[in-house]
Amino acid sequence: TWSTVPAGPPDPILGVTEAFKADKDPRKINLGVGAYRDGNGKPYVLSSVKSAEDLIALENPDKEYLPISGLPEFTKAAAKLAYGADSQPLKQSAIAVVQSISGTGALRIGGAFLQRFFPHAKAIYIPTPSWGNHTSIFRDSGLEVKQYRYFDKKTVGLDFEGMKADLQSMPPNSIVLLHACAHNPTGVDPTPEQWVELSSLIAEKSLFPFFDMAYQGFASGSTTRDAFALRHFVKEGHQVALAQSFAKNMGLYGERVGAFSLVAADEEEKKRLESQLKIVIRPMYSNPPLHGARIASTILTNFELYSEWEAEVKGMAERIISMRARLYDNLVSLNTPGEWSHIKSQIGMFSFTGLTTPQTQTLAEKAHIYMTADGRISMAGLNAHNIDYFSESVSKAVKS
Ligand code: PMP
């Protein structure tokens, strides 16, 4: 029956973990997958998450199905975190929100909804480069996926002029996927001033902004600062779509906690949108998982846990920022050829090092250091124990 089914290629990111696992050298380092690691290289369960789980256990709750649109306390709190308590559409009850299977599921619900109800959209445009899964998610949702210029290899920074030129030439009603903060894989974000310009241009050209916010709080350490772009667009009157993930900022990777939302014109429109979102979700997976949403909503609605969580997000962001500074200093003091200041200026979980594919191969073979072939490293995989070895190995690979 399946003799014509060809073997598919391994996932480019998860494939790195496979190679890492097979390596027996004690010095090995995995900088492939984007999951936070503590100062000892270990997975990190936030203490606010543990406390929330203790509180939940005390209540001894049942395991009944959630509504199709998820846990109401959670979706309400998630929207407040993203849009801000003083958001006009939020106060007017004009934001349709549903719980999703983390950020990926939110993007997929968005893709399916837009495919069904935004048929005049010619395509969805994603940045070059973007998170690898964006293309597959939107293609499988039935949208045509195109790209806009984003990263400038020469400056290892934002190609702002190229990006604006591409937005200028998109047909009206095109969907533009924007990374709200901590762009993956490059770690390069527009400045607040550039976001203001982008918001005006996107309005002028009648484009539809779809924000992917997988790292709120994780980029700068402040959930407010990281929501600047989203909140500015909404304030300027854009009716955005938003995919939220709590994988990184709460360390809830495997619990799959996320939300998808749409800003509506008013409450009546919101109700129509929510009814259709439910119709999109019901045949996909019926209703979302319970436990992670309980954890997130407990943290977001409990004053003490919220403060504890904010400090923990800040701690994760700051540890990453300190590793950037140390890596930069090391590479410079080892006289590594090239300009490395982007390591410090890039934002969030990843750094786009500028290492070439052959250099990444050398690092894997000679130094047992694993990263994606595009030279992206997960900064969270570096710590006081391995950063010097990593810096020396990179310096050697660049010089050879
Ligand atoms: N968008 C971006 C840009 C991401 O980097 C990620 C996580 N790697 C996601 C969405 C979604 O991840 P998850 O489904 O685990 O929330």
Image (tube, rainbow, N blue to C red):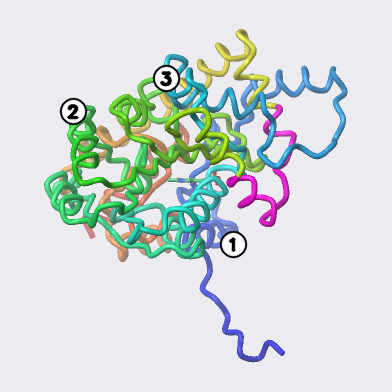
- Residue sitting at x 52%, y 34%: 270
Drawn side of residue 64 relative to residue 137, left or right: right
Question: Relative to 230, is 135 above or below?
Answer: below
261 is within the stretch colored magenta: no
**At 41% across and 59% down in the image, what residue appears?**
119
Per the image, label 1 sits on a secondary structure element best described as helix
Q: Amino acid at mark 1?
A: Ala
Residue identifier under label 3: 87
**Viewer-closest of 251 and 236:** 236
Marks 1 & 3, CB-CB < 8 Å contact: no
Choose between 257 and 188: the one closer to the eye.
257
Callout 2 crowding tier (Cα within 10 Å): few <14, some 14–19, many ≥20? few
Q: Earlier in the sequence, mark 2 or mark 3?
A: 3
x, y percent for residue 158: 20, 44
Image position of 222 with respect to 293: above or below: above
Whichever of labels 2 and 1 marks the residue nearer the N terminus, that label is: 1
For disc 1, the marked residue is 22
Of tags 2 and 3, which is closer to the observer? Answer: 3
- Side of 319 where 398 appears, left or right: left
Q: Give amino acid for label 2.
A: Glu
Q: Nearer the viewer, mark 1 or mark 3?
A: 3
Residues rendered magenta in the picture: 276-294
Q: Are marks 2 and 3 in contact (CB under 8 Å)?
A: no
Mark 1 and mark 3: Cα distance apart in space: 49 Å
